[in-house]
Amino acid sequence: MSSGCPMAPGRRQVLTAALGSVGAAVGLAACSDGDREENRNAAGSPGQGGGRTPGRVAFSGAHQPAITATPVPALASLAAFRVTAQDRAGLTEMFAELSTTVADLMAGRMPESRDPAYPPMETGILGPDPPPDDLGIVVSVGASLFDDRFGLEDRAPRELVTMPFLANDRLDSERSHGDLLVSIEAQHDDTIQHALRQIMRATRRHLVLAWTGEGYARGSEGAGQQTPRNLLGFKDGTANLDSSDAELMQRHVWVADGDDEPAWSVGGSYQVVRVIRMLVEFWDRTRLSEQEAVIGRHKDSGAPLGGTEEFAEVDFSGDPDGRRTPLDSHIRLANPRTAETADQLMLRRGFSYTRGVDKAGQLDQGLAFVSYQRSLSTFLAVQERLNGEPLEEYIRPEGGGFFFALPGVEDEDTSLGAALLA
């Protein structure tokens, strides 16, 4: 790759070989740690880079704006679909219907009313004038869309594969993979539920819902916001990439010309979803000193071990034997901060979830890890280093998938997926 993120030719072969050996534990507290200062944006355009007044996120742009929009909303939902369209024409129609609906939802436009003898055109749960609510929607495609149904086999992103079982995984087929993934973010749950139901209503001829996942306490950016904590009690996102930094996003998130990818995919991004259950009762019985050694940060402040400031630069060169930060701690394995790993960074927008209680009387809680990266090999390289880390004892990946977030569109008259189908 260009822009400081080189990639040798034949990446799909390299990727396939890597899948057999990558580790299972996904980054929780610092998977995409990098040389990032605390993001303290001044109040700006609502929903686009600071401030807490809920606003509108744009639909069009070179990239799907909801991937990087800030402030990051408090709630999120993932909805994976199976495409039931019978041919390329049906798939084209599906993308058109989906794009029109997403554009209307993000702009706050309500469908026209019709004769009350028929079902209403929208849910009604937000009333006649939906609030902005920082609603952001991202549309991504899975590897299974590129089978022989639609003649797209030769147009697949070079690295996109169905997410395999990785070490320590117990993937539930009912919460894994999909032809299409819709990621929805907003400040309130009724906004998310309204958006999902409107999307399902508009696309019911061509899409069937396969699985969903809802959560809260999203990573936050913007003035006056603190780093949220995951359900292990540790701050999550301290060193995440600054999504307002266009140069960082181009280097680490967006597929670019010269990346050995199909021309249509430029401006898109590989999206990883990992539904990771946390064995919270077991974790809660673990000594604090051990918890901090497992993660590599102080639990109260979020500072690197031995430090006092959450956003202090982490430097492992002065601790080669791991006396301060254990060599197998999560943050040290996720990002060793060496010249060789400097470009293995990703943008995370994960969230916590809770699904009640299982049949054994244990809390079913965890993290829906969501990341965007220019190359899927970035994620896999981090996973391989995390293979066998102590944190694996407390987590169990149970679902998710590998997807590709479609490039953005110039205007609302162009459908997401149009370049793919051209």
Image (cartoon, rainbow, N blue to C red):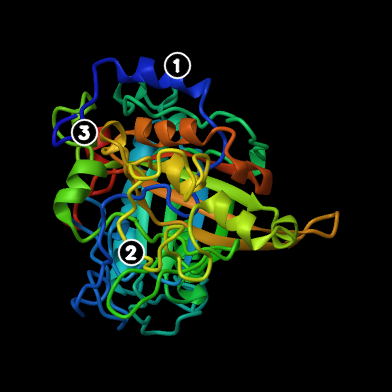
Residue nearer the viewer, 398 or 306: 306
Q: Which label belongs to residue 17?
A: 1
Q: Give percent across and percent down for residue 341.
A: 31, 35
Disc 1 residue type (three-letter): Ala
Between marks 2 and 1 in the image, the one whose residue lies nearer the viewer: 2
Q: Give percent across and percent down for residue 72.
A: 36, 68
Image: 340 above or below 317: above
Q: Is residue 206 visible?
A: no
Mark 2, residue position: 311
Asked if residue 191 lies left or right of residue 416, the reply is: right
Cα separation, mark 2 vs mark 1, equals 36 Å
Residue nearer the viewer, 372 or 66: 372
Cα separation, mark 1 vs mark 3, equals 20 Å
Mark 3, residue position: 5
Residue nearer the viewer, 236 or 129: 236
Instruction: State which tag comes first along the sequence, 2 or 3.
Output: 3
2 and 3 marks in contact (CB < 8 Å): no
Instruction: State which tag comes first along the sequence, 2 or 1.
Output: 1
Image: 161 above or below 373: above
Disc 3 residue type (three-letter): Cys
| Residue depicted at x 23% and y 65% | 58
Dot 3 crowding, Cα within 10 Å, few <14, some 14–19, many 20+: some
Q: Give percent across and percent down for residue 394.
A: 67, 49
| Residue depicted at x 38% and y 61% | 238
**Mark 3 falls on what kind of element?**
loop
Image: 151 above or below 379: above
Between marks 2 and 3 in the image, the one whose residue lies nearer the viewer: 2
**Mark 2 falls on what kind of element?**
loop
| Residue depicted at x 38% and y 42% | 335
Instruction: State which tag comes first along the sequence, 1 or 3.
Output: 3
Dot 1 crowding, Cα within 10 Å, few <14, some 14–19, many 20+: few
